[in-house]
Image (cartoon, rainbow, N blue to C red):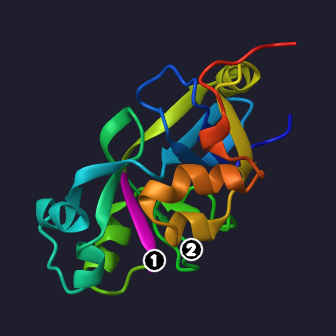
Amino acid sequence: MSTLQDHFLIAMPAMGDPNFDGTVTYLCKHNEDGALGIVINRLLDMHVADIFEQLELEIIDQRQAERPVLAGGPVQPGTGFVLHQADRRFESTLDDSAAVKVTASQDILQAMAAGEGPWPALVALGYAGWGAGQLETEIAANAWLSVPADPSLIFDTPFDQRWAAAASLLGVNISQLTSYAGHA
């Protein structure tokens, strides 16, 4: 099986699921058991400071505190994930060898509040999950495009430009695609 780990999933215009319409999802895990990803372009109406305050963390790094929080996906929307590139080890990082790391433990948030955490970092609540073979079926049904992930799109590209920018990595102008698909 070829893996799409460390790839972007770009929702096609015909995506029927409102959870993913117009989204770019970073796939941080993909194997024969399924896939796990974090949507990187859907903002919540909150900032990282809100999470720091809920955890009663003293905020030293205002730059981190002012970052927006993303809706990472519809699964477990109360669970936080931090996307980063730091070499520092944290308690619960999915793949330490990946270019973009995903950490889901409170120690990274403590480090971020104290000004000792990774920069840049992206904080998301929830994730997108697929069971065994489910993602492959959705790709075959033209629900997604996939492309190797570019960390600069995650950390440097404005949120509202990420969908089009991810598609452009494939040479595709997403606004030129129709909302219906056919099969030959």
Specify the principal SS of the magenta part: strand
Q: Which quarter of the picture shows residue 104?
A: bottom left
**Tag 2's secondary structure?**
loop
Q: Which residues are magenta?
A: 119-124
- For the residue marked with disc 1, what is the amino acid? Pro
| Corner quadrant of residue 127 | top left
Q: From this viewpoint, is residue 6 visible?
A: no
Q: State the residue in front, 32 or 162.
A: 162
The image's mark for residue 85 is 2
Whether 79 is drawn above or below 75: the answer is below
140 over 128 or under it: above or below: above
Q: Which mark is residue 120?
A: 1
Residue drawn at x 62%, y 47% is 27
Determine the secondary structure under disc 1: loop
Q: Nearer the viewer, residue 119 or 16?
A: 16
- Give the amino acid type for the residue marked by disc 2 in the picture: Gln
Q: Is residue 51 left or right of residue 106?
A: left
Question: Do tag 2 and tag 1 residues touch (Cβ < 8 Å)?
Answer: yes
